[in-house]
Amino acid sequence: MLPILLKTLPFFALIGTGYLAGRSRFFSPEATAALTKFVFYFALSAMLFRFAANLSLGAVFDWNFVLAYLSGCLVVYALATAVALWRRVSVEEAAVEAQCAVIGNVGFLGVPMLVLLLGEAAAGPVLLVLAIDLIVFSSVITLVITGVREGRMSLGILRVLGLGLLKNPMIVSIVLGLAWGATGWPVPGPVNDFLGTLGAAATPGALFAIGASLAGRSAERVQVAGWLAFCKLVLHPAAVAVAALVVFQVEPFAASVMIAAAALPVAGNVYILAAHYGVAPQRVSTAILLSTAASVLTVTWVIAMVHGG
């Protein structure tokens, strides 16, 4: 585990650096928001397009992979929902807590870290995990909360979902990249160099932005947040591992990437959704803070296990 820890430590050190910069107010909340916007719309989008453009849809998409990941997620999602309802919270809160339990920071942390640690062959599986998270589970929470509040499903909800996907630069970058790859044309040299240079800013920028954004978070409902962090860091990768390796028998390397992605801490976009709908944002914030801090050890351990396997 020590060799893997030494490899993952620089990634978490970047998060720590961002946290210290934000905590000391050297890096203001406005600066954090601007950096996050740059990474989200430019650097990470360039990285995702470049990865996807060098892949074929046939090489990326695999039904066993999709079913294994979805099955593992749904088991933990159902458990988190059941525990939330048992505590007699609202359906909206239960949906947000379930989102915390299964949605990891794949975009800002997983893509740059796992591709660098496990090699460029990890790009296909990790992009597929990211796409499932963004398309399936972001849609589920929107449907649940909007449906409960309106008391019915409507075409308006579907329009909101469609527009949300079209406006998400990560989804757009992956789709456009795969579309380019499907043509069989190589990415022109200058364009590829441009994307590579811009995309190289995604890793340090995203990790620093994660840390700086954590500096503004305060702890609330620590016991519940701790349970959600446990779901995300332990139960989620365990359920995905059983589904991938035992039930659906996914190809070993792709399964290892999937399991490592499932071990990532709670994603920041869960907080954005919670704040947007006004449903338990502080609880989500605490879950992000706790899971990110604990992931220094848990993610390292999971990567060491799958790397060794």
Image: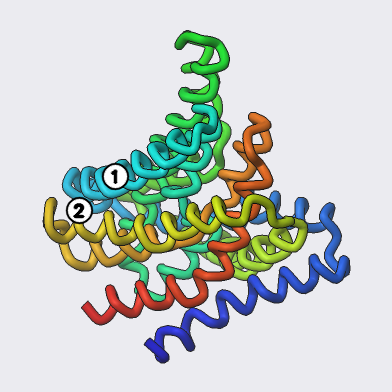
Which residue is the site of mark 2? 243
Query: What colouring method underlies this structural image?
Result: rainbow
- Residue at 56% across, 55% down: 223
- Residue at 68% across, 37% down: 275
What x and y, as percent, mark residue 293?
A: 58, 69
Label 2 residue SS: helix
What x and y, as percent, mark residue 122?
A: 33, 65
Q: Residues within 10 Å of mark 1 (few under 14, many from 20)?
A: some
- Residue at 46% across, 85% down: 5
Quadrant into which the N terminus falls: bottom left
State the image quarter where residue 93 is shown.
Answer: top right
Which residue is the site of mark 1? 75
Does residue 42 appear in the picture of this structure? no
* Residue nearest the viewer, comparing 47 with 40: 40
144 above or below 226? above
What x and y, as percent, mark residue 214?
A: 69, 60
Which of pointers 1 and 2 lies earlier in the amino acid sequence?
1
* Most distant residue in the front direction: 87
What x and y, as percent, mark residue 48?
A: 47, 54
Does residue 266 appear in the picture of this structure? yes
Quadrant into which the C terminus falls: bottom left
Instruction: Check whether the beta carbons of the residues at disc 1 and disc 2 lie within 8 A of each other.
Output: yes
- Looking at numbered disc 1 in the image, what kind of residue is underneath it? Val
Count of labels in the image: 2
- Looking at numbered disc 2 in the image, what kind of residue is underneath it? Ala
* Residue nearest the viewer, comparing 49 with 2: 2
Q: Gap in Å between the C-alphas at discs 1 and 2? A: 10 Å
